[in-house]
Every structure is written in C-alpha cells, then in structure tokens.
C-alpha cells in the first residue's frame, strides 16, 4: 500500500509491537471494505461505475455464455419466469465474469483514475452525506490504492458486477420499449 519501503517497515514494526491496535486496524479495514462494496449499489456513487467503453468488449462474452444456457436467456428476457436455480446460475455467471473483468480493466492507470473519482465523489458530498458515506469512501480508496490483484479485490469486482447489472437493466427497458 505504501510506496516507501522504509515507511512500510516502520508501520509493520509498530503494528507488530501493538497487536491490539493491529487487530483494531484490520477490523476497521474490513468494515470499510464491506461499506465500499455497497457504495456502487447504493445509487449514491454512480460516478464510480465503469464506462460503456470498458463494458462493451465484455458484452459478446456475456452473450456467448448466456446463450450456452437457454434458461438464462429466458430469465433475462422474461424475469417473471425466473426460478431460484436459474437466477443463481445467472448470478454466478455474472460474478465469475466480474472477476475476469476486474483483472483486465483495473490497470495501475485505471486504479489511479478510480482513486481520483472517489476523491471527486467525496468532494461533491454535503458534510452530512460525507459522514454517512465515509466508511465506503475509505474502503474504495483502500481498494483503488491496493497493490493486490484486482481480480481478488471485492470492491473492484462489485464495480464490474454493478456495471453489468446496469447494462442488463438498460437492455430490458429497451426491449420493453421496442416491444
């Protein structure tokens, strides 16, 4: 997380010497990560969603995978006919694809852009809204600045998930308008 190895080592040594503080810090990070995952779905942070240009290359892949299971295709076109099993299969398919997307889309440059978007989102909030959203914002910044594999980052995966869900909803509305 830190670019300076000396500072990183100092923090690690400090936390090793203070296990209760380390446990508290880890607990706080988990809370913030969980809040970050909910941030895109809350409707408050739509500016963090992936762009159409980022999602578009994945649509043929999604279509191909859905077409391999006609029940899923029917679930998408007629949600009222969905059953629990088909819905779970569709959710699993979208989740697996979200993992792949996160690994491909979130390059170092894109993560820097995401961190800037989170900062801009925070700056746009009123003080009361900022207090409510602060754990999610911190978690999102933690995710955007993490050096880990993006395909293992729950927040980045949730951004991909939310973006795919948004496209599916848009396509459903367009289908209804064209019917």
Image (spheres, rainbow, N blue to C red):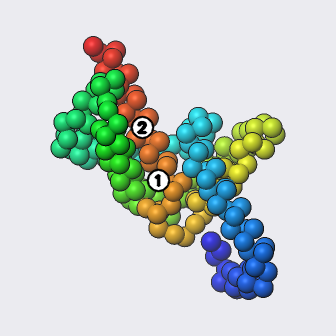
For residue 128, which numbered disc appears in the image?
none
Q: Residue at x 26, y 37 (%)?
A: 72
Residue 30 visible, this angle: yes
Q: Secondary structure at mark 1?
A: helix
User: Residue 19 placed where, x, y %?
Assistant: 75, 79
Q: Residue at x 72, y 71 (%)?
A: 23
User: Residue 107 placed where, x, y %?
Assistant: 46, 62
Pointer 2 local density, CA inside 10 Å: few below 14, some 14–19, many at least 20: some
Residue 56 visible, this angle: no
The residue nearer to you, when weighing 171 against 67, is 67
Q: Residue at x 66, y 43 (%)?
A: 121
Q: Is residue 92 left or right of residue 72?
A: right
In the rendered image, the vertical position of residue 149 relative to residue 110, given as above or below? below
Q: Quadrant of the C terminus?
A: top left
User: Residue 21 placed where, x, y %?
Assistant: 78, 73
For residue 157, which numbered disc appears in the image?
1
Q: Is residue 163 left or right of residue 89?
A: right
């Amino acid at each position: 997380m830190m670019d300076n190895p000396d500072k990183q080592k100092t923090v690690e040594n400090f936390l090793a010497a203070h296990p209760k503080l380390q446990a508290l810090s880890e607990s706080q990070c988990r809370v913030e990560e969980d809040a970050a995952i909910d941030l895109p779905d809350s409707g408050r942070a739509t500016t963090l969603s992936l762009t159409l240009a980022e999602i578009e290359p994945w649509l043929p892949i999604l279509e191909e995978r859905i077409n391999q299971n006609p029940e899923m295709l029917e679930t998408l076109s007629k949600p009222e006919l969905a059953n629990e099993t088909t819905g779970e299969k569709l959710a699993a398919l979208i989740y697996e694809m979200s993992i792949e997307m996160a690994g491909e889309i979130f390059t170092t440059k894109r993560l820097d852009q995401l961190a800037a978007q989170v900062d801009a989102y925070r700056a746009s909030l009123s003080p009361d809204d900022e207090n409510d959203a602060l754990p999610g914002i911190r978690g999102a910044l933690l995710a955007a600045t993490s050096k880990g594999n993006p395909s293992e980052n729950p927040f980045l995966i949730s951004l991909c998930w939310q973006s795919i869900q948004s496209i599916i909803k848009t396509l459903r509305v367009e289908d209804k308008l064209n019917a």
